[in-house]
Amino acid sequence: MSIDDELWDAIVFGERAVVARLVQAAVDNNADVVELLNVTMIPALREVGNQFSAGEVFVPEMLSSAKAMQGAIDIIGPLLTKSGHKPIAKVCIGSVQGDLHDIGKNLVAIMLRGSGFEVDDLGVDCRVDDFEAAVDRGAEVVCLSALLTTTRDAMRPVADHFSNRDDVKVVVGGAVISQEFADEIGADGFGLDASDAIRAVRECLGLAGNPG
Amino acid sequence: MPMTSRERVLTAINHEEPDRVPIVIGVSNATGIKMKPYQGIKDIVSVKAPDDYIYDWPELGTALIDEETMHRLHSDVRGVLDLEPESVRRWNRRRDPHSDYIDSWGSGQTEIGPDDWYPAVHPLPDATTVADLDAYEGWPDMSDSTRIAHVRETARRLAEENEYAILATPWLLFPFERAHAMQGMDVFLLNMIEHPDFARALLERIAGYCKELMGRFLQELGDNVDIIKIGDDLGTQKSLMISPRMYRDFLKPVHADFISFIKERTSAKVFFHSDGDVAPLIEDFIEIGVDILNPIQTNAGTMSDLPALKKRFGDNIVFCGGIDTDQVLPLGSEQDVRDEVRRVMQILGPGGGCMIGAVHTVMNDVPPENVLAMVDAVAEFGHYPLQ
């Protein structure tokens, strides 16, 4: 197995059209899309996440890479399903009640999809019932996002709601969220940024934080 | 003999020590107080005043602080703001109260809960070409005199009273944030990468309107102004939103031109508001003529290193703000607030060049007691020489 350097670069540099062309060509040539995903695409997006965490790239570059990745997943998604490729787990994600901010939430959703999870994106202004319904649809992890000090408390009722469900993990993140806050409300995990959110989701499912 | 508030501020922003550290609160959105804590403060200090909003704009949610409360808050500044055109205000007063608020640029806010509005209305989400900008019919009319009809008289009165420093700011003449309002933040940030020439053109188009209104506003102010507030939020909790290279490429020339435009017309100091960790850009701000930096978000990345900021930039820029609205003001005790005010003043205050205020607007989650604890701590412990 070898990394497809051209595709790697196109994802890292957020070249959406190039990513789409390369992935479509791979599909047309009956390439192994599972291998392409695991060996090139996921590590490439993880590299962008690491560069973002390290302050080497910023929000526009991260958005650009995430959008390129989303385009690729749109192409290979149906093939992955058809090939019997199983997602690591199903997770749901939403900005909490009263919060319409979604840039960070969308980034985490794409990173999760790109990392092999099936993501039920509930959008913004999500109430306890919305998360409950997603769990009924099979989500094992509930990811909560909040940007504001005035909306972070809307995470509490969701964390409380699932506190006696061992089969449901709650992971929180967003600009004003800290590990202390996550501990205080009884969340199972905290992601410092989009990249770290993947680690938090994996760890609360008992998986290694950094997939090989 | 104690100084007047105006003398206090003018001394501090000239990098000299006044009688005490000035307090900047209640004069604009970024230095303002939301309605709920304002009501709480009025209750505590037994002030009877109406629940009015700045910019005559309830959906923004920021209170127009009455004079008695401003006095109780020891605020050393008074504001001169603009208004949306009368036609826009009238339309918004008459619209369905739960429908979107739309401003004079065609952007606006959606209601997400009682007294809670979110800037979700973006008129140019799909624009990617200059032709798209040319085709847009919703550009604002900056020549509408009802925007600034009150400005000359308000500023003249404040100058005649000669008691408080005059801080003037027309609403959101912030090119980067205005571009977010026009397109949606994520859309515009992506366009900076995917359609850079368009992104530059949009910023320049916006800057043209900003300059037109600012020019008219400054003409009305005449000499009756001490500080002009502009800005653009460029930081996040941990870092910058865009890279320093991208800032210098896209935005620094726009900001530099805007500041030159202002300084050609007034001797007032330029107050630049930018949230988050903007430490990597402070040298750029100084270079393009920023005199006062706000809000010094002490919980964001390298902005937390106040001694380093003071040492490196303190001779060339005034720090305004510094009291945390993330943890200390909403969640801390009154003693926590007092301790934080003393800490910030002790680091940023020596030699002048420091004004204290909340980082960002005082939001609805802040207990009114903590706002009073903040300003009272400055009044009690902020006298020079600082202890």
Image (cartoon, coloured by chain):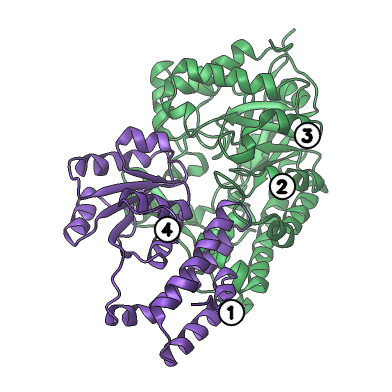
Chain colours: A purple, B green
Whether B299 is drawn above or below B385: the answer is: below
Indicate which label's residue lies in the foreground, 1 or 2: 1
Residue name at image x 61 percent, y 58 percent: A57
**Callout 4: helix, strand or loop?**
helix
Crowdedness near tag 4: few (<14), some (14–19) or many (≥20) residues, C-alpha within 10 Å: many
> Real-space Cα distance between discs 2 and 3?
13 Å
Q: Position of residue B263 (x, y in %)?
A: 80, 46
Indicate which label's residue lies in the foreground, 4 or 1: 1
Instruction: Look at mark 4 in the image and give the residue it sits on.
Output: A108
> Real-space Cα distance between discs 3 and 1?
43 Å
Residue name at image x 39 percent, y 39 percent: A150
Q: Which mark is residue B93?
A: none
Q: Position of residue A87 (x, y in %)?
A: 30, 68
Q: Position of residue A22 (x, y in %)?
A: 51, 84
Residue A101 in sight:
no
Q: Which mark is residue A6?
A: 1
Earlier-in-chain disc, 2 versus 3: 2
Instruction: Look at mark 2 in the image and give the residue it sits on.
Output: B281
Asked if labels 1 and 2 share a chain, the reply is: no
Residue at far front of view:
A1
Quarter of the rendering containing residue B160: top right
Crowdedness near tag 3: few (<14), some (14–19) or many (≥20) residues, C-alpha within 10 Å: few
